[in-house]
Image (tube, rainbow, N blue to C red):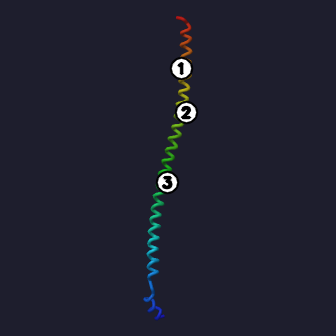
Amino acid sequence: MAKTAMATPGVDLEPLDRLEEKVRMLVGVIDRLRAENARAADDNERLANELHALRARVAEAESTGSELAALREERNLIRSRVNKMLEQIDGLNL
């Protein structure tokens, strides 16, 4: 056993050093990916909120457009009825 302990200092540690460096690099990559994932999740939430708000605005605009069309139709109907009344008044020959 003593000889094995003595032989240990002669072992080449270069492969272990390279492995250690690769593990450090891998930990750095994992940290970076976690940060990017957190940013992407934040962006996703923000964009989902914007999408929800835009959909609400579109629904409101569609409702307003429908209301505008109904008001125009009502205006045309009133205009037509007023024109008929004016024609009837003109027909009285007063």
CB contact under 8 Å: marks 3 and 1: no
CA gap, disc 3 to disc 1? 52 Å
Q: Is residue 3 left or right of residue 91?
A: left
Q: Residue furthest top?
A: 94
Where disc 1 sits, the SS reads helix
Mark 3 and mark 2 lie on one chain; the one further toward the N terminus is 3
Please tell me whether mark 3 sits on a helix, a strand or a loop: helix
State the residue at coordinates (53%, 20%).
79
Q: Position of residue 22 (x, y in %)?
A: 46, 74
Residue pointed to by mark 2:
66
Residue type of the residue flagged with mark 3: Asn
* Marks 3 and 2 in Cβ contact (< 8 Å): no
Which residue, given by chain and number where applicable, does mark 1 sit on? 79
**Secondary structure at numbered mark 2:** helix
Counting residues from the N terminus, which is met first, the one under dot 2 or under dot 1?
2
Q: Amino acid at mark 2?
A: Ser
Instruction: Using the image as rendered, state which of residue 40 and residue 56 is in the foreground.
Output: 40
Residue 68 horizontal/vertical position (percent):
52, 30
**Which of the two discs, 3 and 1, labels the residue nearer the N terminus?**
3
Q: Residue at x 44, y 71 (%)?
A: 25
Image location (x, y in percent) of residue 71:
53, 27
| Three-letter code for the amino acid on which mark 1 is drawn | Arg
